[in-house]
């Protein structure tokens, strides 16, 4: 009843840019922290960036200064602007959000299906 749908992945050359978007839909009462995670082949899923409902952000050291997370609370969307991309940024990127559904008393985490980002010349 709650879905997160990502878009914007693709193939880009080193030094290039991509913008990922994630839209939440369904019977949503409140969205708390939203974020982006990534998983490269053979590696564990790792945090990329998070943003609270009030706009406080947190970034992995590996992306600081290159990636920017933002959100539109009215549209229930979170974006990730990725600049100066490097081959080591290649991964499947997942959107994540803590959501309280209508008619429930607690929040739970939801994940999108993932979008592939490949950085290669």
Image: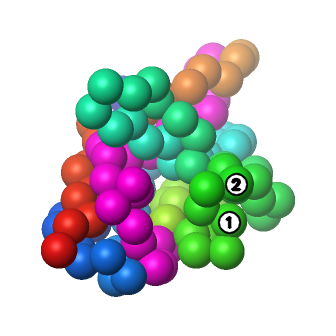
**Horizontal relation, residue 87 to residue 108: left or right:** left
Mark 2 element type: loop
Give above or below for 39 relative to 121: above
x and y percent of residue 25 in the render? 40, 46
**Horizontal relation, residue 38 to residue 72: left or right:** left
x and y percent of residue 74 in the render? 59, 66
Q: Quadrant of residue 19?
A: bottom left
Magenta includes 59? no
| Circle 2 residues within 10 Å: few <14, some 14–19, many ≥20 | few
Q: Is residue 9 visible?
A: no
Q: Which residue is mark 1?
A: 64
Q: Which residue is mark 2?
A: 61
Mark 1 element type: loop
Q: Residue at coordinates 47% horizontally, 79% vertically from top-left?
A: 83
| Circle 1 residues within 10 Å: few <14, some 14–19, many ≥20 | few
The magenta-colored residue range is: 81-104
């Amino acid at each position: 009843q709650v879905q997160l749908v990502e878009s914007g992945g693709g193939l880009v050359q080193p030094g290039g840019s991509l913008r990922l978007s994630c839209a939440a839909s369904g019977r949503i009462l409140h969205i708390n922290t939203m974020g982006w995670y990534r998983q490269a082949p053979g590696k564990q899923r790792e945090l990329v960036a998070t943003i609270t409902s009030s706009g406080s952000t947190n970034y992995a050291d590996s992306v600081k200064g290159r990636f920017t997370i933002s959100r539109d609370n009215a549209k229930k969307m979170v974006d990730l602007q990725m600049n100066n991309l490097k081959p080591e940024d290649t991964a499947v990127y997942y959107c994540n959000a803590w959501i309280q559904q209508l008619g429930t008393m607690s929040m739970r985490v939801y994940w999108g299906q993932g979008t592939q980002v490949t950085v290669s010349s």
